[in-house]
Image (cartoon, rainbow, N blue to C red):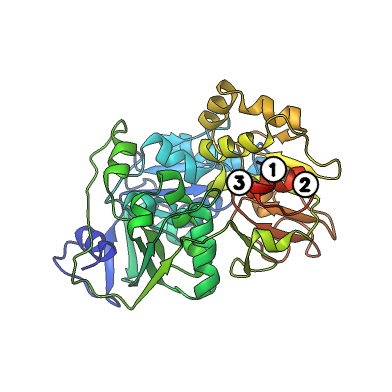
Amino acid sequence: MTITEKILAAHCGKKELLPGEFIKAKVDFALGNDITAPLAIEELKNAEIKKVFDRNRIALVPDHFTPNKDLQSAQQCRRLAIFAAEFNIKHYFEQGRAGVEHVLLPELGLVKPGDLIIGADSHTCTYGALGAFSTGVGSTDLAAIMATGKIWMRVPESIKFIYKGKLKKWSGGKDLILYTIGQIGVEGARYKAMEFTGPVISGLSIDDRFSMCNMAIEAGGKNGIIAPDKITREYIKSKPGKPRFYQSDKDAAYSKTHEYDISNLEPQVACPHLPSNVKPAAELKNVNIDQSFIGSCTNGRLSDLRIAAKILKGKKINSRVRLIIIPATQKVYLDAMKEGLLEIFVKAGGVIEAPTCGPCLGGHAGILAEGEVCIAASNRNFVGRMGSPKSFVYLSNAAVAAASAVKGRIAHPGEII
């Protein structure tokens, strides 16, 4: 069996599973945010549910329209707070303790290798970087899980992605996944488990692994997953709980196998209006920008801010450009402050926001006007994703986003350093 099949089998009490089987599996952890959880709460209320399956294995994270941008978002967050108090939910994160959910939960050790994690947010697939099965569902599914602790689902087929060669300077996990989506398309892994393997993955940092698995959904994937290794073990060694480590069998069956030599892979940019419309950053020098955004559950971690600061130190951003930087959690914010990164951003002319999803989904803190162009270290660039349906979003890693802010156009980091 593949690692995905092994994890699912362990959670439904079977020794063996085949792709296409329907199962009812036990959930280790469930989560919702200020957009999706209120709908789930309403369903629980309608069903007259008086108790959740386990108050210690549910997280409620207000992160999309927070700090509250308007009355409606305030009311959404208030519903989470009232429900958390009424049902004694342990992992309710009020603003000031919260941050972007998919960075916060691994940071706190609430999700672990071998877990089955379900969230009412499509980027729940992020946690596959730890060797867990994690996927997104709708709000009514979340309600059922919160009540029963179980999920009904079909076992996905697996696609194996093998990456060989050596990554060039300025290229990382974001570039690998953008390149992959560019190769297979936004439906290339529809309802499939995307298993990332090979010597390049073995040398990839945990943050880069999070970036890769985070965007499995952009290829239509059911989940993204990387088998745990010494890098995983090092990341979780100080975190609570008992991990379970799974590996795919050598004779496991895959619906497809893709093998890439990425030795010449330059930083990649997804052009409007699909994550699969990918080109090397160096080929887009004629694209002027109005805004650069560094943050989100894809590239808002401390390592991303360090890379951006390295490029921006001692420089000023282009006078025509807004640079918005959002540390993904309070810890990331504090660590960046201690390292002097925030001072570098402010001196360069950047704006630093409180931890939030904000502009990633066109929520707030960086909405695009008609005709404006943004390069974003986030995960989606659909029509209207960050504001006006007549705006344009390009996706890149944090280094390209920082370099572009300086140049006022899409730029390769090598042009700056």
Secondary structure found at label 3: helix
Q: Residue at x 30, y 37 (%)?
A: 234
**Mark 2 Cα shell of 10 Å, populated few (<14), some (14-19), many (≥20):** many
Q: CA distance from mark 1 to mark 2?
A: 8 Å
Q: Amino acid at mark 2?
A: Lys
Tell me which numbered mark, 1 or 2, is placed earlier along the sequence.
2
**Which residue was labeled with disc 1?**
416
Quadrant that contains the C terminus: top right
Q: Are marks 1 and 2 in contact (CB under 8 Å)?
A: yes
Labels 3, 1: front one: 1
Residue 260 picture location, percent across and down: 42, 68
Q: Above or below — where is 305 with respect to 11?
A: above
Q: Amino acid at mark 3?
A: Ala
**Which residue was labeled with disc 2?**
407
Q: CA distance from mark 2 to mark 3?
A: 14 Å
Q: Amino acid at mark 1?
A: Ile
**Which residue was labeled with disc 3?**
398
Q: Residue at x 62, y 28 (%)?
A: 341
Residue 272 picture location, percent across and down: 70, 66
Tell me which numbered mark, 2 or 3, is placed earlier along the sequence.
3
Residue farthest to the left, as pictured: 15
Quadrant that contains the N terminus: bottom left
**Mark 1 Cα shell of 10 Å, populated few (<14), some (14-19), many (≥20):** some
The answer to whether 14 appears left or right of 202 in the picture is left
The answer to whether 285 appears left or right of 222 in the picture is right
Tally of numbered discs: 3
